[in-house]
Image (spheres, helix red, strand yellow):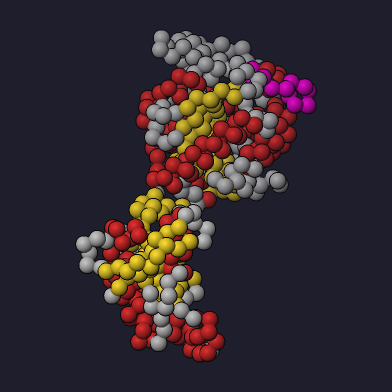
Amino acid sequence: MDVPETHYVRTEDGLHIAYQVFGSGPYDLVWNDTMANVDANWDLPSWAAFLRELGGHARVITFDRRGLGVSDRPASPDVMSLERGMEDLRTVLDAVGIERAVHLGFSWGCALSLLFAASYPSRTAGLALLAPIVYSWSTPDFPWGFATLGQPVPADEPLWGTDAHARAELIDMGGPTDDAEVRAWAKWFRLVASPGAADLVQQATRQTDVRTLLPQIQVPTVVLQKSGDRDRLSGGAAPWIAAQIPGARFVQIPGGESFPTARDAALFDAVDGLAREIRDQEAEFDRVLATVMFTDIVGSTERAATLGDRAWRDLAERHHGVVRTMLARYRGNEVDTAGDGFFATFDGPARAVRCALAIRDAVRPLGIEIRAGCHTGEVETIDGKVGGVAVSIGARVAALAAPSEVLTSSTVKDLTAGSGLTFEDAGERELKGVPDRWHLYRVVA
């Protein structure tokens, strides 16, 4: 995968936020890290390998928060606040045209993911939180932190962006510490933030507490932690964090580093599994009982050859107008039109049958006949498309109908008892691609 192009989008308060979109996976994924430079990320071989692997699983959206990387760096006191970061993320998602995405947060980036999910649950499909940090200070009920609030944090770290600083960070994260890797990370740190900006990040994170958000998270969540994570903030809090989020799962994955790598197959499996779970759940939520109706013109190919293209097109348009008029009259929902056929759904089986009869009678003056089939069952809506076994059954029933005949499954007959409709036994039939034999009924006018 080539290095993606960097784009800019302008926030409501006039700042330019840098972002990238890359990958070709089946779902949208927002990558939230504490600090980043969307350009320099690709100069670190280990980090670039992770991003490329991530792009093989999803369409990834990554961005630089204001004050960092190649985004604008305003000198405002709230530049590093989570609220501003959330505004930057929302602006990027709007620019890309993404309504809902899975959010993968890492370390302090999880705080932004949590705030966004709590504030915009309708725009958050799910959360994957890797080595999450939600608070910096130790308390009796939260012993994972630097020290007690108000006590000084040990200030023994070397100067920001130097080789010594990079080496200390890599040792702390369990990463490689050869000279080439250290120099590459030192340069990355300098390109991500200036010393002043880095200090602002540290000040903001040490004042941030998102623990109260955890019980408010409404989206599917998985909390991940590497077995060898030695980070003093995220090393033990992950199971506790998962327990505070309703329905969240805690998953420990193998690995000695605290940061993600391209080798973390269990990480990618967990995030992919979350995305699949969300997709399957949403398919379940979108399943409803409906009656499907299929119609098509009998002998359309021969009729088109006889009339010629223009005359046939005019006749087909008149047919379409009749069908749509009847669908509106009987409150049907047009799902698809293919050539001379219609596929529609109804929330009542009797209306579907009466609509099919009305279409049959209304097109006769045009000199054409239709065949129609109806079936009632569970249908599902995925990406705006109606599908499911019930749709296949309805199509097969319609294909077996004779000219000017409306066939239905036994389910439609049983559900319309007392409606005044009359049915005639059409026998048992095999439906192509559908198990078992099906008892069909012919609607009698």
Seen at 71% across and 47% down, the residue is 2
Q: Position of residue 400 (x, y in %)?
A: 45, 69
In front of the other: 44 or 308 = 308
Q: Position of residue 171 (x, y in %)?
A: 68, 17
Res 84 → quadrant: top left
| Above or below for 228 versus 420 | above
Q: Residue furthest right?
A: 179
Residue 75 showing in the rendered view: no
Q: Is residue 166 visible?
A: yes
x 53%, y 25%: residue: 251
Identify the residue shown where x is 41% and y is 45%. Answer: 284
Frontmost residue, 64 versus 98: 98
Task: Give yes or no for residue 298 being in the magenta stretch.
Answer: no
Q: Which residues are magenta?
A: 172-183
Residue 22 or residue 250, whichever sits in front = 250
Please check the rendered image and state whether residue 175 is part of the magenta-colored stretch, yes or no.
yes
> What is the quadrant of residue 271 in the picture?
top right
Instruction: Judge from the rendering whether residue 92 lies leftward or rightward of residue 345; answer left or right.
Output: right
